[in-house]
Amino acid sequence: MLRRTLIAAAEQDRIRAAVQAVPATRAVVARFVAGETTAEAVAAGTALAAAGLRVTFNQLGEYVTDPGQAAQTRDSFVALARRLADSELAGPGSELSVKLSALGQLDGADGAARALDHARLICAAADDAGVLVTVDMEDHTTTDSTLDITRALRRDFPWVGVAVQAALRRSPADCADLAYAGSRVRLVKGAYREPASVALHRRTDVDLAYVRCLRILLAGAGHPLVATHDPRLIEIAGELARRTGRGVDGFEYQMLRGVRDGEQRRLAADGFGVRVYLPFGPQWYGYFTRRLAERPANTLFLLRALASR
Ligand code: FDA
């Protein structure tokens, strides 16, 4: 595991350097990633807020097994929260999206406990700034631990949200558990390649599961965060929310930076809450390749940019 991580890290550094060297490919990364520094992320967030959109900042990085690096990620999030506190982005229009594996969750037997300690400090800084925190969901081997840690965080910070992946067979049950008053659940399709024993693979099955989870969340007492770019699911969510008597304040749409930007603005102009996921930081490779994998056209776009050097 560690060996694989180290090799991957070395590969990432090489690929990152190659992509950075070519302005055209740098631009492809910039479509999805706000920049490498906190200042760039805050500038991008400020522009989104000016356009009437909410923001969730994600300091990129994952599967960290070096305690020093995990502490560094925690410190970056804390510094970001303090910076937001002193800016026009203070308040619940801003959110931090945290990957627990970036806080060392998978680093040995006490990794989860240390990730919880780090996440607590991030939540405390977010609390001071009035900004929210949502815990990202990673591959299925981490689901139980991530839900446990979120539950522990919510004892002190009841506004902490968590992502649920519709593709996982367990998710309708998780949604039912999480649909209580005050909870914030971000429903996503799921970005990880998972075994068929735990996850649905056919797109239509995942879409149906998404609607099933959506129904559970919208019928519950929590605050659903509808994170998808899928036009049909966006429409279904709006219709179900209307039928369950939720106003536009009773749920929120969420989308990724660089994906369907026009739709983000259209929904916001129609009065819906729309939050844009804004990833930033030097460790953008894993996130970026997932966005490419989701859509072959993105890979073609990158290859064309590389060919044009
Ligand atoms: P789908 O992939 O079917 O896309 C629907 C349409 O959206 C496409 O036809 C296309 O038009 C557009 N689109 C989607 N992706 C695109 C791309 N990369 N480039 C260009 N166009 C694209 N996953 C996870 O496992 N854990 C998590 O914590 C999160 N967190 C998260 C937060 C937020 C705010 C969002 C929006 C998504 C996530 N995800 C996630 C990712 C999620 O699981 C999923 O992989 C993507 O959102 C893509 O799925 P869609 O629901 O958009 O549908």
Image: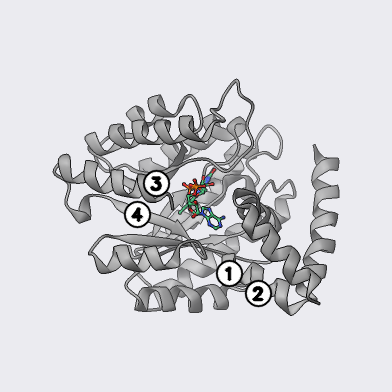
Residue located at (65% from left, 52% from top):
296
Query: Visible in this render: residue 129?
Result: no
Mark 2 → mark 4, Cα distance in angstroms: 26 Å
Query: Visible in this render: residue 48?
Result: yes
- Numbered circle sitting on residue 27: 2
Mark 1 → mark 4, Cα distance in angstroms: 20 Å
- Numbered circle sitting on residue 253: 4
Disc with the residue nearer the chain's start (2 vs 4): 2
Mark 2 → mark 1, Cα distance in angstroms: 6 Å
Residue 131 lies in quadrant: bottom left
Residue 207 lies in quadrant: top left
Q: How many C-alpha atoms fall within 10 Å of the one at disc 4: few (<14), some, or many (≥20)?
A: many
Secondary element type, mark 2: helix
Mark 2 → mark 3, Cα distance in angstroms: 32 Å
Depth check: 202 or 76 in front?
Answer: 202
Secondary element type, mark 3: strand
Q: Which residue is mark 3?
A: 161
